[in-house]
Each structure stands twice: as structure tokens, then as C-alpha cells.
Image: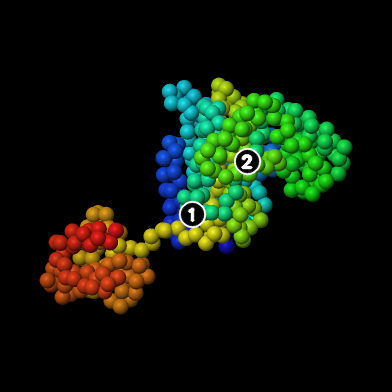
């Protein structure tokens, strides 16, 4: 039997997990500076959460969810995104009652969507996301955008484009919706089957259709920006003002439509401009969702957030030729000859490890020379040599692999010696 990982999933092997850990640690530190705290929610939720949260008319809910019945007959779904879960937890644990508002959360975790896999589009992917719940201050929108851009910039990415739009409040969207229905209705028969349904359910989504994107009616479709009421227009102006003030570049695209139903006011995506990035250029997306907490049973609470997949982030790093400074070499490797020496090596690798040194030794009963080769392959900074002669003198020979210099060190002093040497290195 030849069982492989399911289509659209991947194994992350030790040669790449170092990059993942590095990125996770960098993003966690970014969140610390912006004062976002980590939340961890279940990987599966009641299906209804996403039907209500993400929206019944979205592709995600209609076509992409991994939904199953558990043995108790409940309908559960592997989460396709993190916002609905974060908001559910916010409501369930009454975080809206905390004195410190807004509540600022971040998360990492696998998300699941039954999509057609291609480069940058997986069926299981890892999202990093943030959500700020409890403030309708446009400065929070700017903060979320700033964190999103910093995440990429601090990892060294340069070919970035921040695309911004406003979807306005409920009144603006209703007016725009009516205009869209009026605009597209005469062309209904020419639109794809999905868009014919969208025309009834959620005409905004037509603007995002891949099949109909070249239909002439697309180019002349009414823009949301001309339908923003005064309040929405002012809100959008204030967000832009903050961004200008912070020196964050963006372009406005009135056709930017997000694939989830909960958005209003600010909507954005960050794209990669890097050559050779591939067909999918969106690195991340997010926006404001002022009705979602209420929709999920909480008090009226504004919210905004964004999410990115680490898979696309890694693709962008590769496209820009950025190598992450992930150290993969050992501090120290033990080479020993003979049973007694091997015994001492077992003991002193343990002593050094307890003292915080990154150490390994040979476990293949290799010959002396082959052990040195293994030490080389492990990129050890130091090799500790334990032979018969050394043991008789209760010493080890420590070789600095960079300089080739060797020194005899008494076994009692070995831990202190190695720590001192390594301190000098770092
Ligand atoms: P989304 O646009 O559906 O938004 O996804 C956000 C990001 O997740 C995408 O920009 C992309 O980086 C990544 N992503 C989505 N689908 C896939 C896939 N199949 N394979 C690889 N990466 C993927 C949301 O999920 C919202 N919850 C974002 C948000 C948070 N809005 C407000 N707060």
C-alpha cells in the first residue's frame, strides 16, 4: 500500500520547519509590540457558526467546507478561517465585558477549504490572523493595516502593494446593491450560473467572479465609492488620513470585494508584485466587520482584522530571494573511540545539554573518521574528542572547527569551558 498525504496538504519536513518557527516567532513578537494577545480556538466548530459568520452565499460556505457529522449526529466543520471562531470565543467568554477595550487577539493555525489545489492554494493551510474587537476608531483600522504591512516588511519583503477599499455601512451597501442589481439585470442571461444566483443573493460578489471578469458590464459596474453615505465617506477618509500620516502607501481599488460576507467599511488586501510569484498574487486580506459580533449573539460590537497564510508568505520570500537567518548548525559534536570513551560521551553530552548547549554525538558506532564527517555534516562549531589517551588523563580534546585550534580540557571543566567558548561566539 502506498499512502500519500491527501491532495492539497503538505508535510513540513525538518529542513523547512526552522523557517516556520522563525516566522511564527517574528510574528508573535510583532503582535507583542502592537499589544495583541494570542487566542487558540478549536480546529472544528458547529457548522452553523460559519453559515452565519462567513455567510451562506459565499463560496466558502457553499462549496469549500469540510463538514461532517460526528458520532452524536452533530454537524461540525473544520474551520475554513479564524475570524468566526475568534468572535464566537469573544461572545462565549464575554470578553466584551473586560475593562480594556478593544480586545486585541492574534492566532496561528491550520484552516481547511476544499478548493482546487494549485500553487498558493491548499486544502489545509496555516493562517496567521489578528482581530481587534470593541472599537470603531479609524485609528484601529490603520493599526491593523500597519501590523499587516510590518509583518511582511520586517521579514524583508519589498514588492508589496496594499489595496484598499471601503464597502461602507449598511445603508451605503444597500444603495449600492440596488444599483448593481439594476446594472446587471439586463445582462442576467449572459452571466455564469453562479452570478445569476449572486444577482439575487449578493450582487457585490459578481464583481469578484473569475468567469465573468471580461464581460463588458463589469467595467461599467457602479462603484461602491460613489454610493458611500456621508458617514461612511468620512470614516474612509479618516482611515486614509491615518495611513498617510504614518507613511503607509496604498492604492484604492473600488472593485476590491472580499470573499466573505461579514465586511463593511474598510476592506483590504496585500498583494505581491514580485516577479515569478505565480498566478495568485494576494498575500493577505481583511477588513472591518461591525455586525459580526451581534450576528453571533453578542452585543453590538465593532471589529476589524486580517489574515495571511504562511504558505503564501513563504512563497513571497522565495520569489524575492530572501533567506531567513535560521541557524541550523550544532554547538558541539562528540567523537569517541572505545567503550569507555563512549560512556563518557553519553554522560557529557547530557551534562552539556542540561547546561543549555546544543550537542549531539554518534549513535551508529561509526569509525573515528566517519564520526568527524558526521560532525561536519551537523555543522558543529566544536568537536569534543574522547579517545583512550584522553580518558586516561580524564580530559577531552576540544577542536574549534572554524579555526582548527585544539585544546585539552579536563572533563570536570568541560561544561564551564564550552559555555565560555560559546559565549565568545555569540
Ligand atoms: P481570506 O481572504 O479568505 O480571509 O483569507 C485570508 C488569507 O488566507 C488569504 O489572503 C491567503 O493568504 C490565505 N488563504 C486563503 N485561502 C487559502 C488557501 N486555500 N491556501 C493558502 N492560503 C489561503 C479570511 O480568512 C478572513 N478571516 C480574514 C480576516 C480576518 N478578516 C477579518 N479578520
Q: Residues within 10 Å of mark 2 (few under 14, many from 20)?
A: many
- Please indicate, yes or no, whether residue 65 appears anywhere in the rendered image: no
Using the image as rendered, state which of residue 182 and residue 227 is in the foreground.
227
Vertical arrangement, residue 333 with respect to residue 293, above or below: below
* CA distance for labels 2 and 1: 22 Å
Element assignment for label 1: loop
Vertical arrangement, residue 106 with respect to residue 277, above or below: above
- Please indicate, yes or no, whether residue 167 appears anywhere in the rendered image: yes
Q: Any mark on residue 312, and which?
A: none
User: Which residue was labeled with disc 1?
Assistant: 156
Residue at the image point whose x is 41% and y is 44% from the top: 29
Mark 2 or mark 1, earlier in chain: 1
Residue at the image point whose x is 65% and y is 38% from the top: 165
Q: Residues within 10 Å of mark 1 (few under 14, many from 20)?
A: some
Q: Is mark 1 within 8 Å of ligand 1?
A: no
Q: Are marks 2 and 1 in contact (CB under 8 Å)?
A: no
Vertical arrangement, residue 102 with respect to residue 408, above or below: above
Of all residues, the one furthest to the left in this rendering is 393
Quadrant (top left, top right, bottom left, bottom right) of the N terminus: bottom right
Using the image as rendered, state which of residue 40 and residue 66 is in the foreground.
40
Residue at the image point whose x is 56% and y is 56% from the top: 315
* Residue 409 picture quarter: bottom left
Residue 411: x %, y % from top left? 16, 64
Quadrant (top left, top right, bottom left, bottom right) of the C terminus: bottom left
> In this image, 96 relative to 47: left or right?
left
Residue 82: x %, y % from top left? 55, 39
User: Which residue was labeled with disc 2?
Assistant: 164
Using the image as rendered, state which of residue 243 and residue 333 is in the foreground.
243
Residue 124: x %, y % from top left? 57, 49
Amino acid at each position: 500500500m502506498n499512502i500519500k498525504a491527501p491532495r492539497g496538504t503538505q508535510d513540513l519536513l525538518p529542513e523547512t520547519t526552522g523557517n516556520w518557527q522563525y516566522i511564527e516567532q517574528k510574528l508573535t513578537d510583532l503582535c507583542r509590540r502592537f499589544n495583541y494577545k494570542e487566542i487558540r480556538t478549536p480546529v472544528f466548530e458547529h457548522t452553523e457558526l460559519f453559515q452565519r459568520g462567513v455567510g451562506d452565499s459565499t463560496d466558502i460556505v457553499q462549496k469549500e467546507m469540510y463538514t461532517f457529522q460526528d458520532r452524536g449526529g452533530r454537524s461540525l466543520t473544520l474551520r475554513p478561517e479564524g475570524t468566526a471562531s475568534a468572535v464566537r470565543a469573544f461572545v462565549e467568554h464575554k470578553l466584551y465585558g473586560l475593562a480594556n477595550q478593544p480586545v486585541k487577539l492574534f492566532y496561528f493555525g491550520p484552516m481547511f477549504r476544499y478548493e482546487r489545489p494549485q500553487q498558493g492554494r491548499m486544502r489545509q493551510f496555516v493562517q496567521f490572523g489578528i482581530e481587534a474587537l470593541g472599537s470603531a476608531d479609524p485609528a484601529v483600522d490603520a493599526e491593523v493595516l500597519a501590523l499587516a504591512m510590518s509583518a511582511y516588511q520586517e521579514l524583508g519583503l519589498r514588492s508589496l502593494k496594499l489595496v484598499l477599499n471601503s464597502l461602507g455601512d449598511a445603508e451605503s451597501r444597500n444603495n449600492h446593491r440596488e444599483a448593481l442589481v439594476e446594472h446587471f439585470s439586463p445582462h442576467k442571461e449572459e452571466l455564469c450560473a453562479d452570478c445569476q444566483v449572486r444577482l439575487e443573493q449578493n450582487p457585490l460578489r459578481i464583481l469578484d467572479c473569475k468567469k465573468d471578469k471580461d464581460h463588458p458590464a463589469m467595467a461599467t459596474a457602479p462603484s461602491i465609492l460613489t454610493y458611500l453615505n456621508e458617514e461612511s465617506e468620512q470614516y474612509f477618509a479618516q482611515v486614509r488620513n491615518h495611513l498617510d500620516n504614518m507613511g503607509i502607501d496604498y492604492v484604492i481599488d473600488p472593485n476590491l470585494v472580499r470573499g466573505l460576507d461579514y465586511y463593511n467599511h474598510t476592506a483590504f488586501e496585500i498583494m505581491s508584485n514580485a516577479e515569478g510569484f505565480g498566478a495568485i498574487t494576494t498575500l493577505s486580506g481583511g477588513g472591518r466587520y461591525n455586525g459580526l459580533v451581534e450576528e453571533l449573539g453578542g452585543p453590538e460590537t465593532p471589529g476589524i482584522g486580517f489574515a495571511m497564510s504562511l504558505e503564501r508568505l513563504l512563497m513571497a520570500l522565495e520569489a524575492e530571494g530572501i533567506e531567513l537567518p535560521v541557524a541550523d548548525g550544532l554547538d558541539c559534536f562528540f567523537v569517541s573511540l572505545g567503550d569507555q570513551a563512549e560512556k563518557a560521551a553519553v554522560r557529557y553530552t547530557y551534562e552539556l545539554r542540561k547546561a543549555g548547549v546544543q550537542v549531539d554525538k554518534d549513535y551508529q558506532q561509526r569509525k573515528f573518521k566517519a564520526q568527524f564527517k558526521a560532525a561536519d555534516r551537523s555543522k558543529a562549531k566544536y568537536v569534543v574528542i574522547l579517545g583512550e589517551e584522553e580518558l586516561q588523563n580524564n580530559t577531552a580534546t576540544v577542536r574549534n572547527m572554524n579555526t582548527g585550534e585544539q585544546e585539552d580540557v579536563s572533563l570536570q571543566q568541560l561544561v564551564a569551558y564550552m559555555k565560555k567558548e560559546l559565549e565568545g561566539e555569540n
